[in-house]
Amino acid sequence: MSDAQRRVYNDIVSGPRGSVRGPFDALLRSPELADRLQKVGAYVRFESSLPARLAELAILVTARHWGAQYEWYAHRRLAEQAGLAPAIADAIAEGRRPAALPEDEAAVVDFCRELHETKHVSDAAWNAALGRFGERGVIDLIGTCGYYTVVSMVLNATRHPMPEGVAPPLRPLS
């Protein structure tokens, strides 16, 4: 590693992630970008105004949109540990809007799906998210989708492998 790569590597390891894995294996090839992205990711993942359950739900919606196998694998467990019902993750994995969502989860799913699929959000989705999470929460939700879009793109483009013995969890959507 170069001095710049080593510095970013050490910053990541000493931060809340505790190790370098996933997209950072590839991102370290551009240490300046890796450094900036890891700081955004640390905020989105560990300091966001959104509760962890809802942030993880947004991450799953983003991973499903991008077909990001490793991202889904890494965050499904975290989402369930944060309190997301497995049936909700199952529906998202299948490309379906989960039925009978609590209002806060519905606001996240609808907002994130619209943003990814249409590149916009309807007034209804915006107002539902704004009413639930406030202005900061809506911007944190957009930031979560954006950051994990970059992560998904890096993982997909670099063909980041699944851990040995782990099958890809997402099936292609028709």
Image: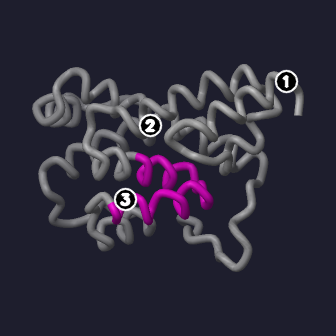
Residue name at image x 27 percent, y 28 percent: 138
From the top left corner, tell me how far across and down residue 151 is, in percent.
Answer: 60, 41
**Residue 87: quarter of image:** bottom left
Residue located farthest toward the right when viewing the structure as drawn: 2
Q: Distance between the residues labelled 2 and 3?
A: 15 Å
Residue name at image x 25 percent, y 29 percent: 137
Q: Residue 3 carries which label?
A: 1
Q: Does the magenta stretch include residue 91?
A: no
Residue name at image x 44 percent, y 69 percent: 94
Residue name at image x 56 percent, y 49 percent: 66
**Which three-letter amino acid code belongs to the residue tagged 3?**
Ala
From the top left corner, tell me how far across and down residue 113 is, in percent.
Answer: 37, 45
> 129 or 54, which is in the foreground?
54
Secondary structure under tag 2 reads helix
> 165 or 72, which is in the foreground?
165
Which residue is tagged 3?
A: 79
The magenta-colored residue range is 59-81
Label 2: how many residues lie within 10 Å, few (<14), some (14-19) or many (20+)? many
Which residue is tagged 2?
A: 145
Q: Earlier in the sequence, mark 2 or mark 3?
A: 3
Q: Is residue 71 magenta?
A: yes
Q: Distance between the residues labelled 2 and 1?
A: 31 Å
Q: In this view, does 77 lie to the left or right of 66?
A: left
**Which three-letter amino acid code belongs to the residue tagged 1?**
Asp
Q: Which of marks 2 and 1 is nearer the N terminus?
A: 1
